[in-house]
Amino acid sequence: MNVPRRSLLAGALGVAGLAGCQASGTFVPARAITHTGGTQAGIDRPAPQPHADLGVFDVTGRPGQVLGGLGDLVLALTSGSHPRLAGLPPGDLTVTVGAGPRLVSAVDPELPGAVDLPVFEREAITHPCRGGDLMVQVRGTDQLAVSLASAALSTVDGVQLRWRQRGFHAERNLLGFLDGTENPRGPEELASEVWLAGPGRVAGGTIAVIRRLRLDLAGFAALPVTRQEEIIGRRRADGEPLSGGGTVSLAAKSADGEYLIPPTAHVRRAHRLATGSGMMLRQGYSYDNGWDDRGLLFISYQRDLRTFTATQHRMDEGDDLMAFTTCTASGTFLVLPGFGPGAPLGGTLF
Amino acid sequence: MRSTMAMTVVLVMALAGCSVSDEDPARRPAGSGPVTIRVPADAATISAAVGAARPGDLVLVSPGVYREKVRITRPGVTLRGADRNKVVIDGEGKRSDGVVVTAAGVSVENLTVTRHLFNGVLVTGMTDESGTGIGRGSDGYQTLDPKRFPPVRDFAVRYVTASNNGLYGIYAFDATAGVIEDNYASGGADSGFYVGQCKPCDTVVRRNVAERNAVGFENANASGGLYVVGNRFTANRVGLTIASNYQEALIPQQQSVVAGNLIGYNDQQSSPAHAEGGFGIGVGISGGRDNLIARNRIAGNPAAGVVLASAEDLAPLGNRVLGNTLEGNGLDVAYAASARAPGERNCFDGNSPATEAPAGLLAAAPCPAGNAKGPGVPYPQLRQPGGLSFLEVPAPPDQPGMPDPARMPAQVKVLPPSQAEIDSLPVPDAALFADRAGASR
């Protein structure tokens, strides 16, 4: 069992707990993760672990049956009782499952999650990497446990892999900047911005958007740091917005009338106030596929797909950072409500 | 010159919130009804005088330079300068606002407000715990909750010269039933005049002059009963904008009237920059609905005279462009709605012969039916020259004062123009209020 390991680490845990969502690369959960209940684990609990393995699948079998079996497998893996974990303690392993628009719209086209993403600018997406029926996101501190769990989850009956991406989480992204900071925090903001309150069959779910963004690291690194900071809208060293004062001020100007955060800076174009959107919970992972394919596995959760689409359209229409990105995989998924014994995964829908 | 110094000053001053204390001694003359409180005879400062005033009182200010931020928090007070050009509230490039009105029935008249980091005159129902008005500024931005902060009612700003203020010259938001008339605004790093976040606004903006601002007049989410008539908006970088803005409350913008104005030659170099890069545009509507643009003279704007565009996912809908004289613009009319927010029912009638994009736009969209739903084409954009610090924009020429300021009765309520009055407004002459303008055109 993993109890001794947790008590060994107890000294470090209080610090990590205080640090909250600003996860460092060495986050260790303070408590055992609750995998059952109203919502799935891996979104609000724990803070993003260092390793992720995300798979997108088609569902060829009956969705209810496939998801039910998948839920049982998730509980067995995260409790450490499954032989495919090879005796490893699961630690903070989480598995989060979402259903794609084809499945959701077949249940009810009015449900959240029934509508697919539109096509955006700067996409180079081969057919299997757009859309999909099933998202399975495995995360954990122990890379070996993540790998083994992912292997077990990839071989369930009635699913067929479309694409897969592993990622790693660190304080900074591959551009060298501190990662997005304006996330909803605490149960109240999560309830108002992330979790779906209804209709009943999706309550406790949320809308996930997954975008794999290849980054032109060479091109970006070739720019002077001051230009990089204009593109992002923050200082590289400490993440301070170019408007100063700790929090982003879109209105701040110099005496001669120029915005301190330039009109085409990423933080301005992506700012939720500018589109009247809710907040996204962003939990991106960096990825490294070798040679010339490195970038960001963008993952966001929100109550309303428009929060993402309105923001992405606005970025397409004038965000200087977009010139350094190419989207190579894209999808949206209804993260299913929480599940557990007697309440099978996807049971309210399929 | 782009200056980080300026920003530092802005931030420091926003924290300091400098002002003269309202507790300075003031003598309110005896009288059974409203009285006149004279500054400095009865009160050393304007702040002390308005602090002692009761509803109906006139605070009459003698010529002088007043270095204070004036907050008017009591209803029914009229603040008036005895000489528009010689009564000067000077922010010295360090105070945030000149006059802030947060009470009903207040009138600000016949004086000059200059060199403030944010606003010359601010009228708003949005206040902090101490009742002080909150304007947009470099210290951050708070979104208005109109339920928590109902609009301030019955305001007037007239015969005010607002120059060299860092955000807006004269700014009314979360305010309704007002009049902004016979004023002059220059050197605004955002706009000379701004009316925003009201529904209905029931506000008249008339006979004003705006020049050498980034934008002459801005409307953001100001809807219903807003009449902008007979003004001169020339020699700014952009003349007039009407926008739906998600950053502010009461979106989308709809139903304002812009009639009988001179809107021209908006390619001024001796002004602060337009933060979004706008330059050479007369009238820009982005995401606005059911506005009337009638019998204006829109001339000599080198990018475009009238631009209809989308704002994020909000289309321009049902705007009417009627009987305007359009001449000498880079392009007279441009329909630039985006593919994701294509507009419709925008219509054109009775305008002078005009250049247009896309071709055939005006003929295909007569009133009242207007254009079929669809996107437009990008309009020609000019690269703007660097901006001038708002403190360095040339000072305005002396402006005509209000007649007989010592005896003119206070007046806040103004009837909006009738439809017949709007319909009979002539297209103004190209020399409208030229004698009040400092820029050569």
Image (cartoon, rainbow, N blue to C red):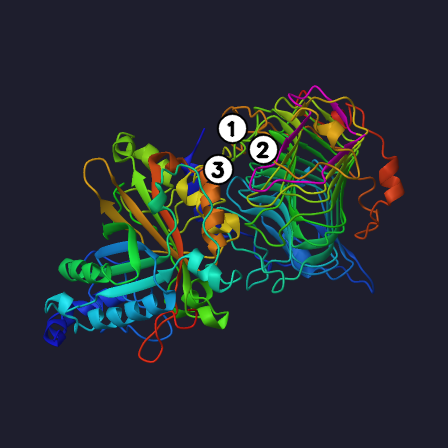
Residue A28's label in the rendered image is none
Residue B214's label in the rendered image is 2
Residue B387's label in the rendered image is 1
Residue A298: x percent and y percent? 33, 49
Residue B299: x percent and y percent? 71, 23
Chain on which label 2 sits:
B
| Amino acid type for the residue under numbered disc 1 | Gly
Is B287 situated above or below B269?
A: below
| Majority SS type along the magenta span | loop
Q: Quadrant of residue B375?
A: top right
* CA separation in Å, label 3 and label 2: 23 Å
Q: Residues within 10 Å of mark 3 (few under 14, many from 20)?
A: some
In this picture, residue A252 sits left or right of residue A17: right
Is B42 situated above or below B305?
A: below
Observer-nearest of B414 and B112: B414
Q: Residue furthest bottom?
A: A342
Chain on which label 3 sits:
A
| Amino acid type for the residue under numbered disc 2 | Ala
Residue B332 covered by magenta stretch: yes
| Contact check, label 3 and label 1, Cβ < 8 Å | no
Residue B395: x percent and y percent? 62, 29
The quadrant the N terminus of chain B occupies is: top left
Helix, strand or loop at mark 1: loop
Chain part drawn in magenta = B324-349
Instruction: Please say whether residue A252 is visible from this viewpoint.
Output: no
| Amino acid type for the residue under numbered disc 3 | Glu
Is B423 situated above or below B363?
A: below
Residue A317's label in the rendered image is 3
Residue A65 covered by magenta stretch: no
